Amino acid sequence: MSSKLEIQAYLKPHCGWSMGVRAIMEKYDLEYTDLDIINNPDIYAEMVEKSGQNLSPCVEVNGVMLADVSGEEVEEYFLKNNLAETVEREATAPTNSPCTDEEHAAMKAAAESKTIRFF
């Protein structure tokens, strides 16, 4: 198992898929950088450039980009490549689940409240 992992996670603040990735990091006690692609356009642009696409989450592990992945897929990658050891505890959030309709509506409302209209 690798002793030092460098993990950059390109995530939305509130998203079912992003919460699943965070839950896997927590489950395996993995240190990572949580990069906010919604509130930081430069981080979003970096994700698109590195991954070659615009869907999230994306997780970069020691220079390997996992593009448009669920927490379940991230967990599978870590275990398959011996980057984490199997643990008995459960993830604290669903690891393969999109946002609910309510979460999408709340994100849309929050985004619209930041919009300035001149009319």
Image: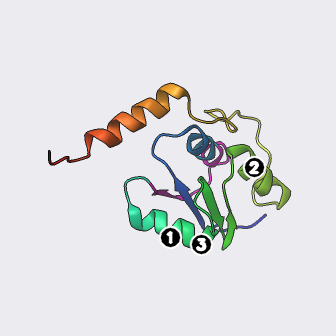
**Residue for badge 3:** 50
Residue placed furthest toward the left: 119
Q: CA distance from mark 3 to mark 2?
A: 19 Å
Q: Quadrant of residue 99?
A: top right
On screen, residue 90 above or below 9: above
Q: Which stretch is magenta? A: 24-37
Along the line of sight, which residue is nearer the eye, 69 or 33?
69
Residue 89 image position (x, y, % from top left): 71, 34
For the point 62% across and 54% down, the residue is: 30
Mark 3 in CB contact with mark 2 (< 8 angstroms): no
For the point 38% across and 60% down, the residue is: 40
Q: Amino acid at mark 3?
A: Lys
Mark 3 or 2, nearer chain start: 3
**Residue for badge 2:** 73
Residue 36 lies in the magenta stretch: yes
Mark 1 in CB contact with mark 3 (< 8 angstroms): yes
> Taking 40 as reference, is 48 left or right?
right
> Taking 88 as reference, is 106 left or right?
left
Q: CA distance from mark 1 to mark 3?
A: 6 Å
For the point 66% across and 54% down, the residue is: 68
Q: Quadrant of residue 52?
A: bottom right
Residue 115 image position (x, y, % from top left): 26, 46
